[in-house]
Image: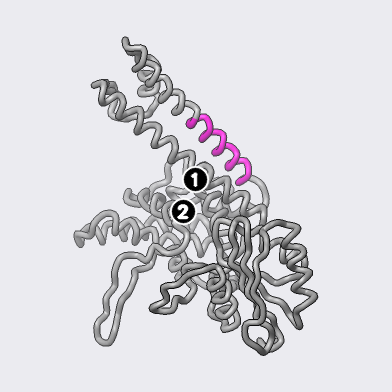
């Protein structure tokens, strides 16, 4: 179907309102108006589009805090709706005026010209699992902040733990629960900080148990089991990778996945000058962090620890062979770059980029036809 037979609709979506810009087939901008962002208003809006438009209707809006609920409501009523990546929207140089009307009009014009990039929408179940993984990540950050507050309070009181070199282990927690202060105000402050840590640790354990339970169920059981064969990737990391990326097969190649995760070098080349800089850090920062954390484990010589052997029990030989090659290749990369004097963080990021290739080969074997993102 040609664009002359399609009605393009740009939507600037906010919490309480939706600014609409409609481009009729074969013509310029036809209508602009504002709708309330409620389920009933959206239903009336869809009926109005179907009544007043000619030919196919295609809508789009930017990905943001409003999520995918609007897209699902449009599709449930038979209207095509695309969520676009905000960072990939072309920007006109010199433009200094930004309003909701202009944003909606710009989306409609770029959508008609085919210059927008779609965000892969997760299903409701995939989005729910992803939110659970991010909830666990938030709990980890909250726990770290609570520990910092308590440690700084104890430092001001000149209370130091010296029974072992490891902080926040079992002996450290026992020492904390036995600690007492003569001053009632200091004791109340200490009790409050310690209670916060205990509650967050229990919350974290509960979230990790729930992730492990969901990771052992279909359709996540097989990919999670395969990913757990790799060194540095256990249940929580494996479930988080699957939840954040939805389906590895939507990427055309391992290189496209590396670029999506922002693990490829940035480049600013012109004419005879070729300049490459740090990694782009584009795309999903949650997955990038998990991969870098997993890559740190490959600094050590390839080995199969007892927990790793238990995780690999019963898994396909193909997956185990890829995981073994990954251990050897990433460790060799670490040795080579370290011998050349490369900074350790840069070396680990390079290892994480190679790890992406092995994970892609595991979940997308060559026999499976892949599709473009």
Q: Position of residue 242 (x, y in %)?
A: 56, 55
Q: Nearer the viewer, residue 62 or 286?
A: 62
Residue 94 x %, y %: 38, 78
Residue 179 falls in image quadrant: top left
Looking at the image, is 345 positioned above or below residue 86?
above
Tell me where the magenta segment starts and ends, as one range.
200-215
Residue with the mark numbered 2: 286
Q: Was residue 246 drawn as part of the magenta stretch in this picture?
A: no
| Type of secondary structure dominating the magenta stretch | helix
| Displayed quadrant of residue 20 | bottom right
State the count of labels: 2
Q: First in sequence: mark 2 or mark 1? A: 1
Q: Are marks 2 and 1 in contact (CB under 8 Å)?
A: no
Would residue 5 appear left or right of 315 to someone viewing this image? Answer: right
- Considering only vertical position in the picture, is 94 above or below 196? below
Residue corresponding to mark 1 = 234
How far is disc 2 from disc 1 in space, using C-alphas? 16 Å
């Amino acid at each position: 179907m040609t664009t002359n037979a399609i009605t393009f609709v740009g939507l600037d979506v906010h919490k309480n309102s939706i600014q609409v810009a409609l481009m009729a087939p074969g013509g310029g901008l036809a209508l602009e108006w504002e709708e309330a962002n409620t389920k009933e208003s959206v239903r009336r809006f869809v009926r109005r589009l179907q009544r007043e438009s000619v030919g196919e209707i295609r809508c789009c809006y930017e990905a943001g805090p409003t999520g995918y609920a609007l897209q699902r409501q449009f599709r449930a009523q038979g209207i095509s709706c695309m969520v676009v990546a905000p960072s990939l929207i072309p920007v006109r140089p010199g433009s200094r005026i930004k309003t909701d009307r202009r944003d909606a009009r710009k989306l409609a014009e770029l959508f008609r010209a085919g210059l927008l990039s779609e965000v892969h929408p997760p299903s409701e179940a995939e989005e729910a699992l992803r939110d659970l993984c991010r909830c666990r990540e938030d709990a980890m950050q909250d726990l770290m902040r609570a520990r910092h507050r308590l440690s700084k309070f104890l430092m001001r009181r000149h209370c130091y733990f010296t029974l072992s070199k490891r902080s926040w282990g079992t002996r450290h927690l026992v020492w904390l629960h036995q600690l007492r202060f003569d001053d009632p105000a200091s004791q109340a402050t200490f009790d409050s900080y310690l209670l916060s840590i205990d509650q967050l640790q229990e919350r974290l354990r509960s979230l990790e148990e729930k992730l492990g339970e969901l990771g052992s169920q279909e359709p996540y059981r097989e990919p999670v089991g395969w990913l757990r064969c790799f060194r540095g990737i256990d249940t929580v990391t494996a479930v988080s990778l699957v939840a954040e990326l939805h389906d590895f097969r939507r990427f055309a190649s391992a290189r496209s996945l590396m670029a999506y995760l922002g693990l490829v070098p940035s480049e600013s080349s012109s004419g005879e000058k070729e300049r490459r800089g740090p990694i782009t850090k584009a795309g999903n920062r949650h997955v990038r962090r998990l991969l870098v954390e997993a890559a740190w484990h490959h600094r050590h010589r390839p080995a199969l620890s007892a927990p790793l052997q238990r995780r690999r029990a019963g898994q396909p030989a193909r997956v185990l062979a890829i995981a073994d090659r990954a251990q050897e290749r990433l460790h060799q990369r670490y040795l080579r770059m370290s011998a050349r004097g490369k900074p350790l963080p840069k070396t680990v990021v390079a290892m994480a980029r190679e790890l992406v290739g092995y994970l892609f080969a595991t979940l997308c074997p060559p026999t499976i036809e892949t599709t473009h993102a």
